[in-house]
Amino acid sequence: MRTLAAGCLGLLLLMTAQIAVATPPSHAVVFIYHRFGDPRYPSTNVRLDQFDAQLDWLAENGYQVWSLPKIVSRLEQGKPIPDHVVAITVDDAYQSVYDKAWPRMRARGWPLTVFVSTGAVDAHLPDFMSWDEMREMARSGVTFGNHSVDHAHLAFHRPGESDMQWADRVRRDILDAQTRLQRELGPDTNTSPRLFAYPYGEYDSVLAQMVTGLGYTAFGQESGALAEPLDPRALPRYPVNEHYGDLATFALKAASLPMPVKTVTPWNPLVQDTNPPRMEVTLEAGKVPPERLHCYLNGPATPVVWLDEARTRFAVQGSEPMSAGRARYNCTARVAGRYYWYSHMWLLPP
């Protein structure tokens, strides 16, 4: 049995005792990993001692690990999901998934979903799994999803590229990846439902519309729990790496609840006219105590401005312009020892 520091153990026991929200909504938490036990890339790697501790914690605290297709299908059909259900997903198909993550999941009988960038696999790059290894995993029940061929910044046009040229290129990148997955892993690979993960977690409303129009349920890299009604354009997953892999943080996220968001304006993550962007959110009434709601922009707190007397509508806007790339507003509210959590990505072209 792994020995935890007394302070960390006390925190976890207290937190577990507080997890008693009456009748939580049907929901599930999805985690995203990339590399395992590969210290060369700390921003996308989780140490093996961290991963082992996380898996032990899930088992010891009564969590169920479900496959991602099962969770998506249940929520799409309005079927209930018990409290404390999580899914483990991995992007890119690095070699450490086969060597280190999959044996640990297989030993527990837990499902795994891997989103594959097929171009890197076809190029036989040394850091990536082979099709033979993935076929072995697929035979044991591992799900494989679409992560495009080239792992490019799909939301952005290339220099001189027209809207039509962009759309043709991106559509071909997605469809070609699906063809390779089905050819190598079988025609039934990831068809019910068909899953897609945006490279770098980047998307805008046009790309999201294309992806869902092709029949995919899509995932980004925002924080938060899944709940019905599902918005298939960009579902949340909690990223895990060395810097955000401590057990207390992992436990808080595993126990989190979906923020009861009714509407978000603008939904489109692409920053266009106003930088920093202003986001307006409408919440379901009576679920989130207004005084417990806090929002942050990439770390620093951002003031919450309530827009109605009932305090169901609020706005947040950062104080400084965003730099090119990705940024996020994170809003949380602690209720009965658990956190309602909502994250919204913003994307600023280079």
Image: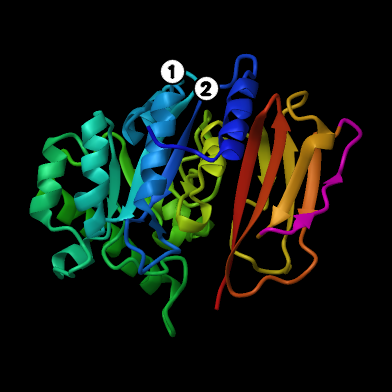
Image coordinates for residue 344, horizontal then vertical, percent: 61, 51
User: Outermost residue toward the right?
Assistant: 309
Residue occupied by mark 1: 79
Query: Residue 224: which quarter of the image?
Result: top right
CA gap, disc 1 to disc 2?
Answer: 8 Å
Q: Residue at x 69, y 45 (%)?
A: 331
Q: Amino acid at mark 1?
A: Lys
Q: Quadrant of the C terminus?
A: bottom right
Colour scheme in use: rainbow
Residue stretch rendered in magenta on the structure: 299-310
Count of all numbered marks drawn on residues in the image: 2
> In terms of secondary structure, what is the magenta stretch mainly?
loop
Q: Nearer the viewer, residue 215 or 251?
A: 251
Asked if residue 23 lies in the magenta stretch, the reply is no
**Upstream in the sequence, badge 1 or badge 2?**
2
On screen, residue 45 above or below 307: below
Q: Judging from the image, what secondary structure is the residue with disc 1 in?
A: loop
Q: Is residue 272 left or right of residue 219?
A: right
Q: Quadrant of the N terminus?
A: top left
Please tell me in which quadrant of the rendered image residue 347 appears.
Answer: bottom right
Amino acid, disc 2: Ser
The spot of residue 204 in percent (x, y) is 52, 59
The picture places residue 227, in percent across and down from the top left corner, at 52, 30
Q: Few, some or many C-alpha atoms within 10 Å of disc 2 (few <14, some 14-19, many ≥20)?
A: many
Up-down relation of residue 255 to residue 273 (above or below): above
Q: Residue at x 73, y 66 (%)?
A: 276
Which residue in the protein does label 2 denote?
A: 26
Residue 11 appears at what percent x and percent y? 62, 34
Kindly indicate the quadrant of the structure image that contains residue 151.
bottom left
Left or right: residue 87 versus residue 324 is: left
